[in-house]
Image (tube, grey):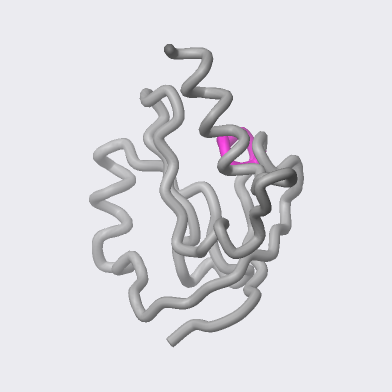
Amino acid sequence: MRLGANRSRTLPGTRIREIYGEEIISERHRHRYEVSNLYRPSLAEAGLVFSAATLDGALVEAAEWPDHPWGLGVQYHPEFKSKPVAPHPLFASFVAACLRHA
């Protein structure tokens, strides 16, 4: 079980790097599941971009669908760091994308 804050490295040129504006981010985890490294090559070949990983690169932390207006998935819990008057950057970015595409 991964619990608590973990640091991740975001890749340049990705949506997640644009949203955070930083290479290294820290987010809270509470899960038992990971993207299987056995499937990373075939998923990447199919177009999925692994845009953030643990500092050692061993575990996927975020993935993006480049041709989607906002398609982004994360392994952590951004809601743990979000407040009604101070939304997490992922939530603010998602709402902004929804408004642009409404």
The magenta stretch is 12-17
Residue 16 included in the magenta stretch of the image? yes
At x 65%, y 75%, the residue is 5
In the displayed structure image, the side of residue 57 where residue 22 appears, left or right: right
Please provide percent x and percent y for residue 47.
Answer: 31, 36
In the displayed structure image, the side of residue 21 where residue 102 appears, left or right: left
- Residue furthest toward the bottom? 1
Residue 3 included in the magenta stretch of the image? no
Q: Quadrant of the N terminus?
A: bottom left
Q: Nearer the viewer, residue 66 or 101?
A: 101
Does residue 63 sit above or below 78 in this rendering? above
Please provide percent x and percent y for residue 71.
Answer: 40, 35
Does residue 34 sit above or below 61 in this rendering? below
Please provide percent x and percent y for residue 40.
Answer: 32, 57
At x 58%, y 43%, the residue is 90
Does residue 11 sit above or below 3 in this rendering? above
At x 51%, y 17%, the residue is 99
In the displayed structure image, the side of residue 23 where residue 13 appears, left or right: left
